[in-house]
Amino acid sequence: MTDKEEQFEDQTNQEGFPEEILRAADELEVSAGFVQSCYLRVLADQEQISAEAEHVDEVQIPAELLASYRTPEPSLDFVSKLEARVQADRNWRQSEWRQLLRKFSTPEPSSSFVDRTLAALGQQSGSIHTRPGLWQGRMLTAAAALLLAFGLQWSLSLSRLEPIAPASAQDLSPVFWGTSLQRQSESGVRFEAPDALQIFIRQNSRGGDD
Amino acid sequence: MTDLNPETIARAQQGDEQATREIIEFLHRPVIATIYRFLGSRFQSEVEDIAQDIFMKIFRSIERFDPERGVKFTTWIFTFVRNHCFDVLKKKRLPSSSLSSRDEGEGQISLPDPAASEPVYKAENQELGLKIEEALEQLGEDQRMVFILREYEGLDYGSISRVTGVSEGTVKSRLHRAKESLRHRLAPYMRTGT
């Protein structure tokens, strides 16, 4: 087998054949003896490889001759420079990771969230004054929304006290990263709070309309 | 080649700076030597940068090394070296057998060679070294890598098989061809024993 053939073999071993090539190959007409001749060639190649492998230790290149080919000495500061670069890279990755975590934490509800929600409720229900039967229900929904919003804000401020960004050497461990993510996702309130509030209001207002 | 202490590797996986340094100290010479021998002296000025890039890749992925899989750490390291060196050659688009730059004085070894203390020995040694380098560069990339890993770094066939991603039989076959080719090219020097 030539070097080119070996390289092709390595490449196909590593990458595999793309689907389109395999499909095109199915449609290709080959000569009747192709499979057999190919098989025999592969066998011969395998035999040659085995034969060469068996004689591998018979050929010796003197060690003193090989030792004449010397490699350059590394720079004196190679290790310290590399160590500094590795450490800087770790710090950069930690900082990137912290930024990524920050992106995944939910934003605080804006101060006008409750007002806007109430206003939206008022528009959706049309004229509250013309439907006096619903008025009390709307007020109860609004009060519940306010209470829930305050509760959520309080819960967010508490959860923010827990450090979520890793700050030790453990940062580099994917296991630790996974745990951090899991810890974030487990605190369901932080991710789901705004949606839950909206659903709560929507359900209540829809119920009132029905 | 002896392997690193598993505890050192585990500490480096946790980000321990001392362990990181120990690993670099332990491996930087064989890594640099392998790069130099594989790529040739025309890459002399880039060898340390290439080695640094390889170590950066290694330490970015070190958490993925699992000793339970039965692979030596040094074998794992040489997989990075092999893949990166092949990438370098691909990117540079340089035929591996080209030696044109040597005549123009590029790639000369300018770093100190502590073993070559006597001037006469040094001159002979360098000339022979160049002949060996030329012979190595005439080999195909796969054969050259197998030869370097076996003859210079002392890796066993199983480890070379893991590094190169081919069977042990193919490793031995490549090594046999490489040795035959080198024996043929270096025959005058082998006869005189120098």
Image (cartoon, grey):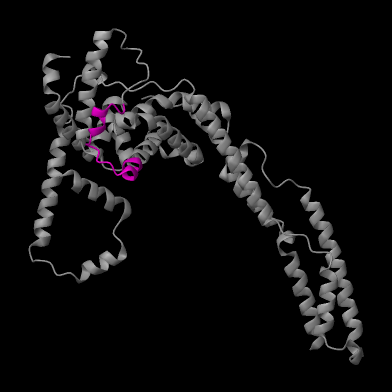
The residue drawn where x is 79% and y is 76% is: A201
Residue A40's place in the image compared with B124, above or below, is below
Residue B53's place in the image compared with A203, above or below, is above
Q: Position of residue A41 (x, y in %)?
A: 11, 51
Residue B97, image quadrant: top left
Residue B144, image quadrant: top left
The residue drawn where x is 28% and y is 50% is: A11
Camera-side residue of B119 and B78: B119
Query: Which residue, as the protein is rendered here, is positioned at the far front?
Result: B104
Residue A169's place in the image compared with B109, above or below, is below
The N terminus of chain A, quarter of image: top left
Q: Is residue A3 in the magenta section?
A: no
Q: Position of residue B161 (x, y in %)?
A: 29, 38
Residue A107, image quadrant: bottom right
The C terminus of chain A, quarter of image: bottom right
* Numbered range of the magenta stretch: B87-107
The residue drawn where x is 21% and y is 66% is: A25
Image side of residue B187 versus residue A10, left or right: left
Image side of residue B9 versus residue A109, left or right: left
Q: Position of residue A32 (x, y in %)?
A: 8, 66
Answer yes or no: is residue A70 visible: yes
Image side of residue A147 versus residue B36, left or right: right
Camera-side residue of A198 and B162: A198
